[in-house]
Image (cartoon, helix red, strand yellow):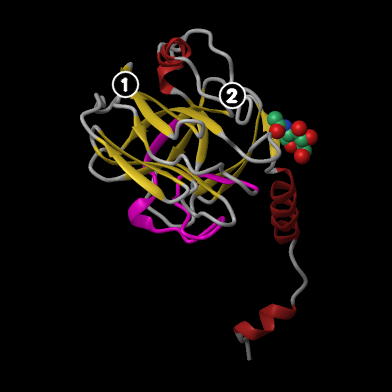
Amino acid sequence: MYSSANRRYTAPTVMEKLVFFLVLFTGCSAKYEADLKGKVFTFPLVSTNSYVELQPDMEGSLSAVTVCLRSFPDNKRANTLFSLATPSHMNAFLLYQSEVGAYRVHINDMRYDFFGLPDHLNKWNSVCWTWDSRTGITQVWVNGMRSVRIMLYADGVIAGAPSIILGQEQDTYGGGFDKAQCFLGELTDVHMWNYVLTPCEINSYMSDISFTPGNVLNWRAINYTVHSNVFVEENQLHACY
Ligand SMILES: *[C@@H]1O[C@H](CO)[C@@H](O)[C@H](O)[C@H]1NC(C)=O
């Protein structure tokens, strides 16, 4: 009698071996330093398992941060833009777009909502976010417009090895994803600095003219690991150049 159980004992076919080695190979080589100039991460579906891990180039704690990125989100929903967790704070440095023009920031689990920022629909949006522990002041910039400057977290630093994830929001260190908070759309030009950029430097980033790349995350030399349905694609903005 032919039963499916018998299939377990058949030797793997050449194809099965090939798939096995491909999985091994991509599993080991997924983490590498790449220049992503002109590339985007496309997050094309709502999920709890599609995301990108970024390896920061840093040691010790952060007493100031700037994160800049460009986002082309699905604006019918809320989207997590940048999730940095530490072993003691799941929302250590979290940027969340709650609706069009509204950006929610968390620093070591303290939270503030910025409103009235000029998001473009169905276009790329340039977003920068700064924080300095010396004053506790945090601020976001969207497409050249700045927000108010708010004291949010002045009680210390962001300490412990950061787990940085694009595409999902961490409710546990490196996990605890909720599909209602995942990112749907495209992200590009992700940079992170361990200091506050001047308004002039932020404007250079926003206009995409020459700027000093991030010293913690640099899109031109970044170590990343892609999980499930995230695709590294050409930016359609540059497709005709
Ligand atoms: C990327 O990872 C490799 C291996 O761990 C390391 O040698 C390299 O410095 C990393 N590059 C960056 C930009 O962090």
Residue at which label 2 appears: 214
Image x and y of residue 96, in percent: 36, 42
For mark 2, give the secondary structure: loop
Q: Does 30 sit left or right of 45 as displayed? A: right
Farthest residue to the bottom: give it.
1
Q: Look at the picture and state if 125 lies above or below 89.
A: above
Q: Which residues are magenta?
A: 161-187
Which x, y percent locates residue 5?
64, 85
Residue drawn at x 69%, y 79% as measured from the top left: 8
Q: Is residue 22 magenta?
A: no
Q: Earlier in the sequence, mark 1 or mark 2?
A: 1
Instruction: Answer few, some or many: residues within 10 Å of disc 1's Cα (few below 14, many 20 plus, some between 14 and 19).
Output: some
Q: Quadrant of ligand 1?
A: top right
Residue 167 belongs to the span the image colors magenta: yes
Q: Identify which residue, 136 or 220, lies in the foreground.
A: 136
Residue that label 1 marks: 146
Whether residue 123 is situated above or below residue 184 in the rendered picture: above
The spot of residue 161 in percent (x, y) is 65, 48
Determine the residue positioned at 36% across, 51% down.
181
Compared across the picture, whether 181 is left or right of 202 comes to left
Type of the residue with mark 1: Arg
Are the two marked residues, 1 and 2, in contact with CB atoms closer than 8 angstroms? no
Name above or below for residue 134 compared with residue 236.
Answer: below
Q: Measured along the vertical axis of the image, is residue 206 above or below residue 76?
A: above
Q: Quadrant of residue 13?
A: bottom right
Residue 19 or 129: which is nearer the viewer?
129
Which amino acid type is marked by label 2?
Gly
Q: Position of residue 87 (x, y in %)?
A: 59, 56
